[in-house]
Image (cartoon, coloured by chain):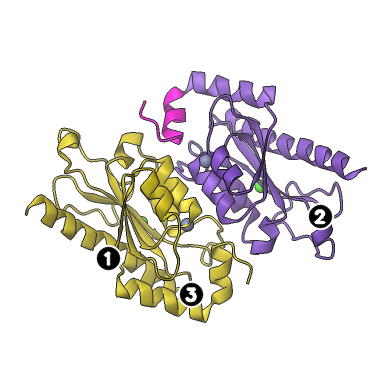
Chain colours: A yellow, B purple
Amino acid sequence: MSPSDTRTALDRLGLATALAKARKSYAEGGIPIGAALVFHGNDSSSASQPPPQGNEGVAALSLSSGAAVLGSAHNARIQKCSPTLHAEIAALEDAGRLGAGVYRRCTMYTTLSPCSMCTGAILLYRIPRIVIGENTNFVGGEDLLRSAGVEVVVLQDGECRELMARFIKEKPEEWNEDIGEIS
Amino acid sequence: MSPSDTRTALDRLGLATALAKARKSYAEGGIPIGAALVFHGNDSSSASQPPPQGNEGVAALSLSSGAAVLGSAHNARIQKCSPTLHAEIAALEDAGRLGAGVYRRCTMYTTLSPCSMCTGAILLYRIPRIVIGENTNFVGGEDLLRSAGVEVVVLQDGECRELMARFIKEKPEEWNEDIGEIS
Ligand SMILES: [Ca+2]
Ligand SMILES: [Ca+2]
Ligand SMILES: [Zn+2]
Ligand SMILES: [Zn+2]
C-alpha cells in the first residue's frame, strides 16, 4: 500500500475500534463514547525504532510497519462511577505507562470531539494527531489542539453521530454531568 | 471567623491535605504530588443549598458552613502504573460522580502547578479556583486557567517545593515520563 492508503486504512481501523467501544458502552447503559490510541510506527523518522508492546494485547494488530492499537476503551462514568474516565483518558489508561517518545508517534481516535480534559491529556503527551468521529453533538478543544500544532481530522461519521444523539436524547442528565453542564 | 479568615484557614487545610497525600506517595516510592478537591459551601449565592456528601469521608471536615474535603489523592503513576492518575485527576476520581453545580463551588488544591491534562479537567468542570503549592519545579496551565476566569493562587510553599525537588533529583526519568518529556 502507498503511505496515504496505509493511513486511510489505519484511520478506518482506528475509528472502528473506538466505535466498537462506544457501542459496548451503550449496550451496558453507559455513555457511548469510545477511543483508541494507535501507534503509527511507520514514520520514516522512527523507522529504526521498535514498536512498543501493548500491556494486554486485546486489540493489538499490525497494518503497516509496527502499527498497533496500544489502548482502547470507552467512557466509564456510569459503569465505574467515574468522573475522569472519559474515553480518551480510559484509552491512555488502557495503554499503560509509555515512554514520552511513544506518544509522539501515535494517533488518538475518538468517536466525539474531545472535552477540555481530554484535549489537555493529548497536549500533555504531545500526541501529534487526533481523528474525531464527529463534532455535531459536542465541540471540544479542537481549536486549542490546532493552535498547539496537533493535526485534527473530523470524519463526520454518521454512526458515531447517531449513537451519541440517541444517548443524549435518552439520558440528557448523564450527558450533562459528563461535560460539567447543569441540567 | 471573618470570611477572609475562613478562606485562609480553608486554604491552609486544603494545601496541608494535598501535601499529606504527596508525602504518602513519596514514602511509597511514588511521585510526590498531592491534590484535594474542597467544597467551599459558604458562598452567599449557595447558602440555601445543602453540601454534597463525600463518597468515603476519609478527610471530610467542616470549617465553615458546609465546607468539606470531597476528594484527596496523590499521583499514582508508579503505584498503579497509571499514566492518567495525576494528583488532580485522582482527587476528582476520589470525589466520585458529582453534579455540575457542586464543582462550581469547589477549590482544587494541588502541591504543584497543574499540567495540561489537569488544567483541562478543572476547565471541564468549571472549578472556579485553584490553590497551587508551588510552581518553581514545573509551570503548567496557569495562564490558560486565568484566561478562562479561574482564580489562581500560588503559595510558593517551601515544603511542597523541597519534596518535589528531591524527587526530581532522585528519579528524573519517572518525572519526565509524567510530564511527557523525553529523558
Ligand atoms: Ca483494552
Ligand atoms: Ca481519599
Ligand atoms: Zn473528555
Ligand atoms: Zn496533571
- In whole angstroms, how far apart are the C-alphas of marks 1 and 3? 20 Å
Q: Residue at x 26, y 40 (%)?
A: A52
Q: Amino acid at mark 2?
A: Asp
Disc 2 crowd, CA 10 A, few/some/many (<14, 14-19, 20+): some
Q: Residue at x 86, y 49 (%)?
A: B64
SS state under label 3? loop
The magenta span reads B172-183
Residue A11 part of the magenta-drawn span: no
Query: Is A143 situated above or below B161?
Result: below
The image's mark for residue B43 is 2
Mark 3, residue position = A29
Where's residue B176, x and y in %? 43, 29
What is the quadrant of residue B47 in the picture?
Answer: bottom right
The quadrant in which the C terminus of chain A is found is bottom right
Where's residue A125, x and y in %? 39, 41
Chain letter for mark 1, please.
A
- In whole angstroms, how far apart are the C-alphas of marks 1 and 2? 47 Å
Where's residue B50, x and y in %? 81, 64
The image's mark for residue A16 is 1
Nearer the camera: disc 1 or disc 2 = 2
SS state under label 2? loop
Asked if both marks, 1 and 3, belong to the same chain, the answer given is: yes
Q: Is mark 2 within 8 Å of ligand 2?
A: no
Residue B176 part of the magenta-drawn span: yes
Q: Amino acid at mark 1?
A: Ala
Q: Residue at x 46, y 43 (%)?
A: B82
Chain letter for mark 3, please.
A
